[in-house]
Image: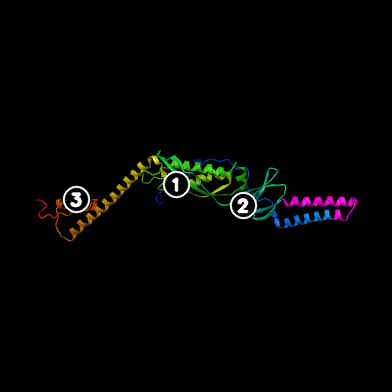
């Protein structure tokens, strides 16, 4: 809002999260098409050795061929266990005996070390909408509010290893940030230049996004946008606050009407004087001003009165 000064959120006001112990890096992987062909070829070669050894060879050669065929087929099957299908908007977090070995983000068929474990994690843009929260604003008035947050996983390693459950973590931190912002500002500001949740929604949501980013950055999450979806007084004080808002609106409307009426009276007196239509002394001017203000500011239609005498009789 033009003319509104928002002090930037300092580092001391934001929650301090621990530094991440692990960060994402690319895992070693190769295109899966070639690995699939080699695996199928090895499996076929193993089956062929078993078939040839059982059908055509005899003695020790037969046993050796069958064992080699079994080992070749087993090795090919094990190697093909490293194949992964990665869809767009997904990633695979690779671990070898509990140690983080990188993340596969390239979509398509990829091959990694078959001895590793691969955890699927979505990197798509997500929405999280909080439930309707009941809190007290800066003036102590109970209000209800809810917010929606658009976010995505930026660092898959942090999302998987730095927090226990990044989905629950984002949900809890979002609710905490919304509550904290709500108690920092009033629903309606009593001062004209004061910030309020209802009157300065854009500025407040910007501060909400900054605080959310500080809260969820440790989980490798990036906040894209945050907005209030519900904002109202609590039911127990809604009627009283509605009367206050209506009274304020009536006062503002009356002030505007009076300002306009004064300007019209001033213009009428100026034109009467300039065009010398009638000469008015101070008492007649006062009477004219009073009559015009009554007509212009009254909430009912004026009743015309014809004066056949003079002002002094």
Q: Of the residues under marks 1 and 3, which one precedes in the sequence?
A: 1
| Secondary structure of residue under mark 3 | helix
Q: Is residue 309 left or right of residue 93?
A: left
Q: Of the residues under marks 3 and 2, which one precedes in the sequence?
A: 2
Report the Cα–Cα distance between label 2 and label 1.
32 Å
Any magenta on residue 76?
A: yes
Q: Quadrant of residue 194?
A: top left
Of circles 3 and 2, the one toward us is: 2
Report the Cα–Cα distance between label 3 and label 2.
76 Å
Say which mark, if any, is on residue 230.
Answer: 1
Closest to the observer, 161 or 83: 83
| Image x and y of residue 61, in percent | 89, 52
Say which mark, if any, is on residue 43.
Answer: none
Say which mark, if any, is on residue 290.
Answer: 3
Report the Cα–Cα distance between label 1 and label 3.
48 Å
Q: Main secondary structure of the magenta part?
A: helix
Q: Is residue 85 left or right of residue 46?
A: left
Q: Of the residues under marks 2 and 1, which one precedes in the sequence?
A: 2
Q: Residues within 10 Å of mark 1 (few under 14, many from 20)?
A: some
Q: Residue at x 62, y 46 (%)?
A: 157
Residue corresponding to mark 2: 90
Q: Is residue 312 left or right of residue 217?
A: left
| Image x and y of residue 149, in percent | 51, 48
Of circles 1 and 3, the one toward us is: 1
């Amino acid at each position: 809002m033009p003319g509104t000064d928002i002090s930037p959120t300092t580092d001391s006001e934001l929650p301090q999260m621990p530094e991440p112990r692990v960060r994402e890096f690319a895992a070693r992987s190769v295109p899966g098409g070639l690995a699939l062909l080699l695996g199928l070829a090895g499996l076929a070669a193993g089956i062929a050795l078993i078939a040839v050894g059982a059908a055509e060879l005899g003695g020790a050669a037969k046993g050796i061929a069958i064992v080699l065929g079994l080992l070749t087929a087993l090795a090919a099957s094990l190697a093909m266990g490293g194949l992964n299908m990665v869809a767009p908007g997904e990633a695979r977090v690779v671990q070898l005996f509990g140690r983080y070995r990188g993340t596969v983000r390239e979509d398509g068929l990829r091959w990694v070390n078959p001895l590793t474990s691969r955890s699927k994690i979505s990197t798509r843009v997500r929405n999280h909408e909080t439930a309707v929260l009941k809190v007290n604003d800066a003036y102590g008035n109970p209000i209800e509010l809810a917010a929606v947050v658009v976010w995505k996983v930026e660092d898959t390693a942090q999302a998987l290893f730095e927090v226990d459950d990044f989905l629950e973590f984002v949900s809890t931190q979002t609710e905490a940030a919304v509550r904290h912002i709500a108690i920092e500002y009033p629903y309606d500001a009593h001062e004209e230049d004061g910030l309020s949740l209802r009157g300065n929604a854009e500025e407040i949501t910007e501060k909400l996004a900054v605080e959310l980013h500080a809260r969820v950055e440790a989980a490798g999450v990036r906040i894209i946008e945050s907005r209030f979806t519900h904002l109202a007084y609590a039911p127990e004080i809604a009627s009283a606050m509605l009367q206050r808002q209506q009274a304020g609106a009536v006062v503002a409307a009356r002030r505007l009407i009076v300002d306009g009426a004064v300007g019209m009276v001033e213009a009428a007196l100026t034109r009467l004087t300039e065009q010398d239509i009638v000469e008015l002394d101070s008492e007649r001017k006062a009477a004219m001003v009073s009559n015009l203000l009554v007509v212009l500011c009254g909430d009912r239609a004026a009743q015309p009165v014809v004066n056949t005498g003079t002002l002094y009789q």
